Amino acid sequence: MKRRSLIQGCGSYLPERIVTNSELAETIDTTDEWIVERTGIRQRHIAAEGQFTSDLALNAAQRALDHAGVKAANIDMVIVATTTPDNTFPATATKVQHNLGMVNGAAFDIQAVCSGFVYALSVADNMIKGGQADTIVVIGAETFSRILDWEDRGTCVLFGDGAGAVVVQVANGADASADSLGPPDVGDNRGRGILSTHIHSDGATRDLLYVDGGPSSTQTVGHVRMIGKEVFRHAVTNLANIVTETLDANGLSPDDVDWLVPHQANKRILDGTARKLKLPMERMVVTVDRHANTSAASIPLALDEAVKDGRIKRGDLVLMEAMGGGLTWGSGLVRW
Ligand code: UT7
């Protein structure tokens, strides 16, 4: 029987401190009205001094493991998607591995900026299908506040800190022997699982969204720089394309999707994607108003919220999609 993977549980963590748009307007030339109208963002969580990406990641991972009923001793792999690692090296994932109490397995980071979570999910899915691991914790964790230029109103109002995690496991028993993960008409015996993942990048567009520092270039950490309008334009097109590619690969249509869990960058991008797909906004999970853009953490944060409040139910078809610096973009389709 072919191996397939499924998401066994999820968890998330947000730092305590909330910063509202009005608070930002006290130090930079902006207004709550501008930020809400242009982005839909009302507030963001900001990590405390001394609280690192690995700390947020650890909290989210522990919650996901509890939700999945999986013990640290049974994890084969920890993958952290982040653009804001604690250090240039070693990988933030190794710190999470140690802090989870794991003495076996492998841990590494993935860098695909805001697409990091779907990239990491894709790697985990294929590691499991290929037989290299049975249980993988996939985490998206960021302290983006640390790489923002707090004098650049065009970027600093957009981002926030946070972490989300999922436990991905090889399907066993009834899940493994189910006829299909796909459309309802294939049969009643539909299992849970990751139907497919899709990833893309286009390095020709890397100057649209980048950090102006790094160990090899400037030996500084640097700050986020973005040509917002151009990124916006690419986002709406790339995201609609990746959704179509994903549904086509599985013989599905937008009507089959129970929940779209998109990367949360801008409410206008979410609205645009929904319009292009003719998907009612009621079937999209939106957190950008409260979390802002938490880069690799935004999808697992939104997913966890919708699972825990009961919107996403067993058997639902959940589509995740993201686009970020690189540019990178990708998706994951899951029967929950
Ligand atoms: O995670 C994936 C990557 N990120 C994204 O997907 C973000 C994509 N881009 C966007 O979300 C939008 O382009 C932004 C929200 C970043 C900007 O919105 P926009 O409608 O494209 O505005 P703009 O950059 O064209 O700026 C319009 C005006 C400018 O003033 P002038 O030149 O017209 O006088 C800006 O200086 O708005 C000004 N502006 C602001 N005003 C008040 C820019 N930022 C602010 C601000 N407060 N925070």
Image (tube, grey):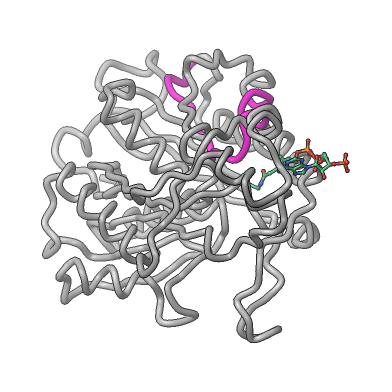
- In this figure, what is the number of numbered marks? 0
x 68%, y 50%: residue:
28
x 38%, y 67%: residue:
52
| Quadrant, the N terminus | top left
Q: Is residue 265 magenta?
A: yes
Numbered range of the magenta stretch: 256-273
Residue 284 image position (x, y, % from top left): 49, 23
Q: Quadrant of ligand 1?
A: top right
Image side of residue 299 versus residue 37, left or right: left
Question: Which one is in front, 286 or 186?
Answer: 286
Image side of residue 268 versus residue 123, left or right: right
Residue 1 drawn above or below residue 105: above
Residue 148 drawn above or below residue 105: above
Q: Is residue 215 visible?
A: yes
Query: Toward which corner of the image does residue 172 lie, by quadrant?
Result: top left
Residue 270 image position (x, y, % from top left): 61, 29
Image side of residue 50 versus residue 217, left or right: left
x 64%, y 43%: residue:
25
Image side of residue 106 versus residue 68, left or right: right
Query: Toward which corner of the image does residue 148 lie, by quadrant?
Result: bottom right
Residue 326 image position (x, y, % from top left): 68, 59
Residue 328 image position (x, y, % from top left): 64, 53
Question: Which one is in front, 255 or 146?
Answer: 146
Residue 310 drawn above or below residue 1: above
Question: Which one is in front, 316 or 151?
Answer: 151
Q: Is residue 1 magenta?
A: no
Query: Toward which corner of the image does residue 202 lie, by quadrant?
Result: bottom right
| Quadrant, the C terminus | top left
Q: Is residue 244 visible?
A: no
Residue extending furthest front?
26
x 49%, y 52%: residue:
296
